[in-house]
Image (cartoon, rainbow, N blue to C red):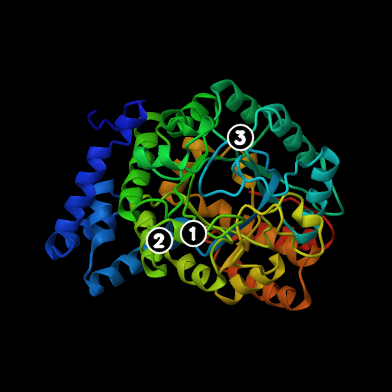
């Protein structure tokens, strides 16, 4: 099969021969300073890079050029997303699963993991617990099981989540990370008011993909890889992609990931709303050393930097799979969203002690949401709980046009400050509240338009008086 970015066939828009030629080309040119300089010059135009040019930057072995890559990634992130970091939490609904994925403890053959599925009453209790932490945005997760986790169950859970109002809390946007499904089911998810549909490819290497998914519906490489096209056909215009680094060679996965982004842009006019970069981690009956494609923290950070340069408009996500130390290092290189206070077990937020019997993976950064917010502000970032773009219809091509032009910051910066103010009043510790007020006062002055600054100040007063959910 020949490589065709506009093809609707998985093996043509994610073409094995093209990826291998790209990795080979990158290896041959990793010390070609003239070529690297030319690629960096084009990258500075903030219009992105194709998978082959970006792969050269990833392979580069010149320390001075690597520093240039990092510096450029950091600046591009600031240009598109400022110093804001959006916060969210995963909510695990069920770990029943019929697949045989070799890297996930939810696989069907695991007979000693506790199987659990939340009732709607339990979902409501989890949502209250998350609201009491201060969360406004969730990513719901569930194993693939047509009997225990049918689409009707997922839709019921979404309705329950949106219905819960507790004190000043509300979940304002639900993103969905469930198995590949049909166009009709994507339409139903769209009609339920979801934010982003998220699906990790796990690995773009078809041969390895089929070996890692020996049984179950997920074994079908094409059906899984073409899911985002069906989601967009079903009306979901914000989709999130990612691979599970460590399952295959990182250079292969990097090229495949960018080819997927290029395909979505070429066919639908809208690239991925988010790109996630998880790594294989220890979990119940899963040993990450069983996979021989692990990568160093330094290379992991370089992958993030090169993704930011290649796809400057995309949101980048790092989860609590990574340690606080790694998150601190990688966040400046392009990450715009992180999870905080996460629990990866089914029903874990209602427990005083973190349960481990239903976890999908071990959490490396186990700080509370308040501690994460405090850390971000001390590091110079604005923690944001904003969901305004989803609810104002700034999704898909509308979001991308605003993001690519830089105009989105006229909305996002003030929205971040107002949602931070809500968190400080309703949920923050005394120390976090003190630091947060200083951050807000300082960052108001960075709002370009005086009229907007005045409106923000007025709304901050109203928030202090009890009003909530202002947005631009």
Q: CA distance from mark 1 to mark 3?
A: 22 Å
Viewer-proximal residue among 271 and 412: 271
Which disc, if any, is residue 98? 3
Per the image, the residue denoted by label 2 is 294
Horizontal side of 148 relative to 405 (left or right) equals: right
Which circle, 2 or 1, is nearer the viewer?
Answer: 1
Residue shown at the point (66%, 45%) measured from the top left = 111
Tags 2 and 1 touching, CB below 8 Å = yes
Which circle, 2 or 3, is nearer the viewer?
Answer: 3
Q: Is residue 211 above or below residue 286?
A: above
Please, what secondary structure does the residue beneath circle 3 have?
A: loop
Q: CA distance from mark 2 to mark 1?
A: 8 Å
Per the image, the residue denoted by label 1 is 288
Q: Residues within 10 Å of mark 3 (few under 14, many from 20)?
A: many
Viewer-proximal residue among 38 and 316: 316
**N-terminal-most mark, 2 or 3:** 3
Quadrant the N terminus occupies: top left
**N-terminal-most mark, 2 or 1:** 1
Residue 377 visible, this angle: yes
Q: Is residue 396 above or below residue 422?
A: above
Q: Position of residue 373 (x, y in %)?
A: 65, 68
Please, what secondary structure does the residue beneath circle 1 have?
A: helix
């Amino acid at each position: 099969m020949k490589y065709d970015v506009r093809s609707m066939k998985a093996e043509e828009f994610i073409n094995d021969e093209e990826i291998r030629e790209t990795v080979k080309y990158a290896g041959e040119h990793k010390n070609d300073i003239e070529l690297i300089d030319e690629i960096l010059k084009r990258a500075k135009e903030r219009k992105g890079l194709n998978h082959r040019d970006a792969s050269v930057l990833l392979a580069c072995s010149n320390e001075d050029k690597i520093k240039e890559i990092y510096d450029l990634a950091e600046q591009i992130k600031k240009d598109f997303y400022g110093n804001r970091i959006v916060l969210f939490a995963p909510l695990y609904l069920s770990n029943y699963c019929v697949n045989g994925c070799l890297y996930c403890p939810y696989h069907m053959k695991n007979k000693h993991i506790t199987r659990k599925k939340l009732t709607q009453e339990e979902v409501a209790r989890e949502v209250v617990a998350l609201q009491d932490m201060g969360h406004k945005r969730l990513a719901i997760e569930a194993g693939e099981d047509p009997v225990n986790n049918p689409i009707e169950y997922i839709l019921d859970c979404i309705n329950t989540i949106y219905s819960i109002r507790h004190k000043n809390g509300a979940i304002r946007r639900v993103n969905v990370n469930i198995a590949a499904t049909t166009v009709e089911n994507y339409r139903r998810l769209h009609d339920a008011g979801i934010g982003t549909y998220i699906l990790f490819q796990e690995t773009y290497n078809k041969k390895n993909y089929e070996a890692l998914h020996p049984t179950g519906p997920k074994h079908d490489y094409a059906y899984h890889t073409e899911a985002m096209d069906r989601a967009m056909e079903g009306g979901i215009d914000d989709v999130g992609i990612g691979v599970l680094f460590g399952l295959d060679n990182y250079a292969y996965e990097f090229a495949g990931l960018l080819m997927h982004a290029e395909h979505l842009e070429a066919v639908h006019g809208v690239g991925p709303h988010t790109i996630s970069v998880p790594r294989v981690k220890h979990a119940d009956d899963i040993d990450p050393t069983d996979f021989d494609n692990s990568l160093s923290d330094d290379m992991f950070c370089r992958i993030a930097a090169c993704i930011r340069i290649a796809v400057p408009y995309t949101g980048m996500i790092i989860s609590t799979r990574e340690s606080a130390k790694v998150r601190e290092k990688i966040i400046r290189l392009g990450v715009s969203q992180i999870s905080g206070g996460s629990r990866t077990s089914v029903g874990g937020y209602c427990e005083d002690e973190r349960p481990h019997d239903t976890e999908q993976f071990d959490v490396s950064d186990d700080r509370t949401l308040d501690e994460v917010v405090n850390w971000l502000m001390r590091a110079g970032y604005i923690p944001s709980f904003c969901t305004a773009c989803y609810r104002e219809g700034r999704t898909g091509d509308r979001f991308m046009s605003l993001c690519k032009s830089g105009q989105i910051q006229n909305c996002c910066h003030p929205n971040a400050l107002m949602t931070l103010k809500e968190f400080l009043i309703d949920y923050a510790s005394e120390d976090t509240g003190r630091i947060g007020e200083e951050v807000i006062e300082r960052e108001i002055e960075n709002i370009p338009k005086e009229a907007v600054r005045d409106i923000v100040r007025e709304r901050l007063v109203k928030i202090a008086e009890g009003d909530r959910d202002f947005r631009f």
